[in-house]
Image: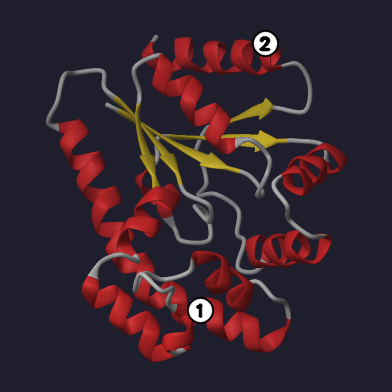
Amino acid sequence: MAVIGLVGRVGAGKSTVASLFAERGAVVADADRWAHDVLDEPEARAAVVARFGREILGSDGRIRRSELAARVFGGGEESRDALEALEAIVHPRVRERLAAAIDACAEGPVGGVVVLDVPLLLQAGWDARCDRLVLVECDDAERHRRLASRGWTPEQVAARDEAWQRGYRPPRAGLPVDVVDTTGNPAYTREQVGRIWDRVIG
């Protein structure tokens, strides 16, 4: 079994790279999706409401993720404290799911590949469970254009970049690192992922 960790800034194209690995048979552990699922769990929802107030809830009783994101990525010390509080609620629950995904693959067919699509993989120490990393890079101008097309403001992008940079540390010594550049033609991105896949399953 091989565990590949994806590393890169928001908008760099990690989800695209993860999907290309999935096409080749990898199991993708999507931490963002699980984080969304966690917010629907009664215990986690209650903890978020206790920290952020009932105004964080929509008319359906679910957490309004856009409002929550505005609170934790608004910039400034208050937002950083809010992000740390949210991470303390969500991250342990997501960690359980990530660990379970790795363990399940380890018990499966020999040669299985798990791809960890975790926004703050190095910051959270998940490189300790990886056999190699894939650094997903993209020109900042293109990355910002992609995020703007999603409706993100420059301030929101800057806040996400600041959150990514805060606590960043190099990967553990000796861990192989491949680079995938997603700036240009999608066919080139696919080709790069294919070469990495061939090395992994060798």
Q: Is residue 161 above or below residue 100?
A: below
Q: In this orientation, does residue 177 appear?
A: no
Q: Residue at x 12, y 31 (%)?
A: 107
Residue located beneath label 2 in the image:
187
Q: Residue at x 35, y 23 (%)?
A: 26
Residue closest to the far front: 59
Q: Is residue 37 above or below residue 62?
A: above
Residue closest to the far right: 141
Q: Give x and y (percent) for residue 73.
A: 65, 71
Residue 98 shown left or right of residue 86 in the figure: left
Q: Is residue 194 above or below residue 153?
A: above
Q: Nearer the viewer, residue 37 or 198?
A: 37
In the picture, residue 111 is in which quadrant? top left
**Residue type, label 1:** Glu
Residue located beneath label 1 in the image:
84
Q: Residue at x 37, y 90 (%)?
A: 50
Q: Nearer the viewer, residue 164 or 64?
A: 64
Instruction: Identify the image quadrant of the N terminus.
Output: top left
